[in-house]
Amino acid sequence: MTRSSSPAAGLLFALASASLYGFNIVYARMASFAGASGSAIVVYRVFLMLVLVGIVAAAARSSLAMAREERGKLLLLGISSALQGICYLSSVAFIPVTVAAVVFYTYPIIIVLASPFVEKTPLTPALVGIVAVATLGVCLVVGPAFSDLDWRGLALAFGASVITAIQFFTAARCPKTGVVAKVFWVQLIILPTAIVISLAAGQLAPPSILALAPFAVAMTIAGYIGGFVLQFLALGRITAVAAGIIFCAEPVVAALSSAIILNETLAPLQIAGGALVLAAIMANVLLEQRRPKGALAHRTQKRAPVLREKMRETET
């Protein structure tokens, strides 16, 4: 199947994935109310993911071998994935889902700020403007209700954002390992990491803890697995840029579903701040979409004198 074979289906898969991820965090908050910690949910959903990946690998006869030179990167990818899931799911035990989602979704801005150092790409005035708008948006979301927000939730959500940026940069450096193998090894690395963190935090509980909120836990795990699978299906049909625009719907879905399911409310300034963050993220995605063309044109112009000189040498 080629990427262009079914772009409409890819867009639908991406929208469904973003929606499931948005629902996932709402039900994680419901589970936390009943006493099921985010780290415990991560541990048991990894068990399920490993079983599912093993079944898929066996059915498709896919190799689970990892590229030797990418082992260190896959280790970092697995650890960052574990920390991201634990921090984000745990943050909603202290702050509302809408605030956690907006703080977490600053990770594209962190990627922009870090890209000059990691990817050696220039930090343009347009990118600086996008960062400023996103920062203002986060301040508006957090500012009006800062006295009512638990600093632990804010720290966990922002930590998840930073870790996600690390996850993105690391994942881009593992092109030789197949998708099925990558998912398997990442989940296998997540498991002990999540167990160690749960033990350190005193939150590693037996599977019976999931029975405290069976529906909420089931929806949290199902939302994550469904979103994860649909995300890969989407990226097989559309570009990462197109998917990125669609995935901006995730915090919107999280906010709407938390308002409907949990009866959470936002002040007008917080709503405006959330809109600014989403606008900044979408502007950044659009800017990234145009950048390769500009970069290609720049390289072509730079090489033009050399090509002309070679042509003259050939003619003589």
Image (cartoon, helix red, strand yellow):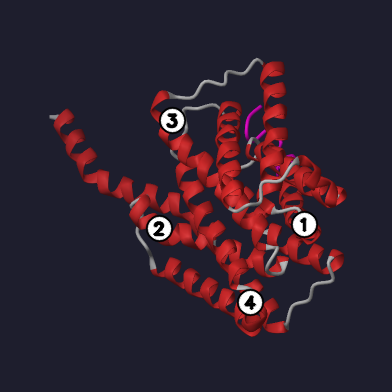
Q: Which residue is mark 3?
A: 71
Residue at image x 53%, y 39%? 78
Neighbour tally class for label 1: few under 14, some 14-19, many 20 plus, Cα within 10 Å:
some
Q: Is residue 313 magenta?
A: no
* Mark 2 → mark 1, Cα distance in angstroms: 37 Å
Q: Is residue 8 magenta?
A: yes
* Mark 1 → mark 3, Cα distance in angstroms: 36 Å
* Res. 258 image quadrant: bottom right
Closest to the camera, between mark 2 and mark 3, is 3
* Mark 4 → mark 1, Cα distance in angstroms: 27 Å
Task: Name the kind of residue labelled 1 in the image.
Answer: Gly
Neighbour tally class for label 4: few under 14, some 14-19, many 20 plus, Cα within 10 Å:
many
* Mark 4 → mark 2, Cα distance in angstroms: 23 Å
Residue at image x 65%, y 37%? 232
Q: Nearer the viewer, residue 71 or 150?
A: 150
Residue 114: give its label.
Answer: 2
Disc on the earlier residue, 2 or 3? 3
Disc on the earlier residue, 4 or 2? 2
